[in-house]
Amino acid sequence: MNESRRDFLKLLGLGTVGAGVALPLLDPARWTPAASAATRPGPVAAAGRQWGMVVDVEKCMREDVRRACVEACDREHNVPRIPDPEEEVKWMWTDDYEHVFPDEVHAHTPESGRTAPVLVLCNHCTQPPCVKVCPTAATWKREEDGIVMMDMHRCIGCRYCMAACPFGARSFNWRDPRAWVERDADGKPVSDYPTRTAGVVEKCTFCAERIRVGGRPACVEAIEQVPGAEGALTFGDVNDPDSDVSRILRERNTVVRREGLGTGPNVYYILPASFPATAADGRV
Amino acid sequence: MLQNVFHGSRRYWAVLALWTLLILVGLAAYSRQFAEGLSVTGMSRDVSWGLYIAQFTFMVGVAASAVMVVLPYYLHDYKAFGRTVILGEFLAVSAVVVCMLFVFVDMGQPRRVLNVLLHPRPNSVMFWDFMVLGGYLLLNLVIGVVTIEAERKEAPPPRWVRPLIYLSIPWAVSIHTVTAFLYSGLGARPFWMTAILAPRFLASAFAAGPSLLILLALLVRRFGGFDVGRKSIGALSTIVTYAMAINVFFVLVEMFTALYSAIPHDVHPFAYLFTGLEGHAALRPWTWVGDVLAVACAVLLLVPSVRHQERWLVPLCVGVITALWIEKGLALVITGFIPSPLGAITEYAPTAPEIAITVGVYAVGGFVLTTLYKVVLSVRERLQSA
C-alpha cells in the first residue's frame, strides 16, 4: 500500500469536510446584522397576545376596497409583481369563494357565489404546520404576539413550508424578485422594506414592522382611505376581550378557513348574507 | 486498497470518462440554476417540489434496500449472500450520496444548507431525514470499507464492526420511514396523508433496490469477472417478487380507501393520475404504463420457472425498476400538489436544465459506485489469483 497516497486521500477527505463546514460562512447574509437579535424570537414577553384579523367578505366584494388593500401591501413590502402566475409572489390577494371556503359551497351554490372574490392572506395559525416542518426555524411563531414570522436570511429555500401550508399562503422566489419591484422616479424601490433574494420563501407578516412601532397593518390602514369601506378589515388582539376583533367574534357569525384541519387560523371571515347577482369579473 | 481506484482497464476508464462527461453537463446546468434561481426548473408556486425531490425519494429506497442482503447474511447466516453483501452496501453508499445531492440541488439557498445543523429543529421531519441519511452513509461506508479491507488481508473483520452492522439494519428501515413521514404528516396534502405510505415505500424499495442489485451483479459477472453465484441471484429475485407483490397490494389498498369512500379530496389525485382532472392529464400515460408494468412484472415474477431464467429475469428487473420509478420518482411527489390547496390545477414538466442536473446527479452516483465496485473487484481478483 502506498502510504503517501493514502495520506493524500485522507487529507482530501478532511479537506472536503472542511469545505462543507466553511461553506455557510461564505454566505454574505451571515455577516449582515439584519438576521441578528432584533428579528429573532426573544424571551417570552407578555404571553397571551395573539394578533388576528376579521375580513368582512361582503364589504370586500367591492373591487376598489380589495385593490386598496392589496396595493398597500405590495407597496409596503416591495412585493414583486411577476406576471407569470407560476412564479408569482403573493402576500395578500383575491381568490374565488369556492377555493377559499371549499366546505361552504355545494351543488346548488350559484356561479356568482362560487366565484365571489375573497381576500386571503397568511392565517397566522395557532398551530402553524409551516413552523412545524421548517428544518431551520427560519419561520417561527412569535411567542409575544402570535405572528408567524419569516427570517429571509436563514431560510434555505427547501419549500417544505409550502408543501405543509393548507392555505397556499407562502411564495417562493423562483428568481431574483428585484426586477419586478415597483420603483420610484430615482429607480429605488418604493418602500424601505428590505427586498428579497432569489431562493427564499416569503409571506404576510401582519406588518410586524409597523406593529413594532405601534402601528397597524398597511391593508387595514388603506381601508380607511376608501369611503364607505369601514369595517372591511378589522385588526386586533383576539385574546383581549375588549378589542374590536373580539367584539366582532362575539357578535357576528364568523368562520375560519378549513377549520377541520386544526391549524387554528387567526384570520376570521364574516360570510356574506347573500351573493352578488352576477358573477364577478375584475380581479385584484 | 484505495489505490485500486487509480489502476484499471481501458473499459474502467471509459466508464469513468462517461460519468465525468455527464457530471460536467449537470454542473453546467447547475451553474445556470445557481445564477438564475430555481426558475430554470419546471416547478411553480403550486407544484413547489418536482423531479429532484422525487428522485431523492426513489433513491432513498434504493439505499434502504441494502438491508435485504445484510439482514439474511448477518442475522440468519445466509451464506449465499457472502459475495453479494458488499455490493449491496456500496450500492447504498452511492444511493445516499445521490439522495443528498438531490436535496442539495433542490435548495433555493444552497450555501445555507448547513443551517440545518447550525439551527437544528427536531420538530421538522426534514431535520431527521438529514440525520438518518448522514448516519446511514457513514455506517455503510465504514462497514463496507472495513469488511473489504479485512477480506484483502484474508482476516475476519474486526469485532467492533459487528454492532455497526446490526445497527445498520433498523437504520435502513428508518431512512425510508422518515422519508415517508416527510409526506404523510401533512394535512394540506391528502394524497400523501396516508398511514400506508411508509410501508408502501419500504415494499417498493425492497423491490426496486434488489432489482438494481441483480442487474449490477450480472454486469459485474459479465465485465468484472466476478460471480456472486446463482443462489444469490435466485434469493434476490425471490425478494423482488414478494416485495413487488406486496407493493401492488398496498397501492390497491390505498386506492380502495380513496375511491370507495369517494371523498373528493382523496379521489382527485387518483382521478388526475388515471383519467386526468378538468382536462389536465400530463401524468396519465405514465400512470398507465407504470401500473400495467407493475402488475405484469409482479405476476410474471411469481412464476418460478420464469424468474429463474436470466433471460426473463433481466427484463423483469428493468420493468420493476421502471414501474417503481414512475410511481415514486415521478407520480407520487407531483400529484401531491394537484390540485393545490386552493383548488388550482397547475401541471408540471421538468425543463432541460432540470433534466441535465438530474442526470448529472445520477452520474455522480454512477461514478462513486464504479470506483467502489472497482475496489471490490480488484481485491477479489487478487485473492482468486493468489
Image (tube, coloured by chain):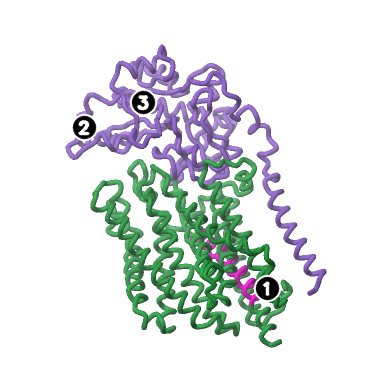
Which SS does the magenta portion mostly show? Answer: helix
Pointer 1 with pointer 3, Cβ within 8 A: no
| Residue B18 in which image quadrant | bottom right
Colour representing chain B: green
User: Which residue occupies 58% across, 53% down?
Assistant: B104
Q: Amino acid at mark 2?
A: Thr
- Distance between the alpha carbons at the discs numbered 3 and 2: 25 Å
User: Which residue occupies 38% across, 21% down?
Assistant: A233
Res A236 visible? no
| Residue A245 in which image quadrant | top left
Judged from the image, the secondary structure of the residue bearing numbered disc 2 is: loop
Residue bearing mark 2: A278
Residue bearing mark 3: A268
User: Which region is colored magenta?
Assistant: B351-376
Judged from the image, the secondary structure of the residue bearing numbered disc 1 is: loop
Q: Amino acid at mark 1?
A: Pro
Residue closest to the far left: A108
Residue A1 relative to residue B291: left or right: right
Residue B224 in percent (x, y) is at 60, 82
Q: Is A190 located above or below residue B376 in the figure?
A: above
Q: Is-magenta flag for residue B357?
A: yes
Q: Amino acid at mark 3?
A: Tyr
Chain letter for mark 3: A
Q: Is-magenta flag for residue B287?
A: no
- Distance between the alpha carbons at the discs numbered 2 and 1: 82 Å
Q: Nearer the viewer, mark 3 or mark 2?
A: 3
Res A70 visible? yes
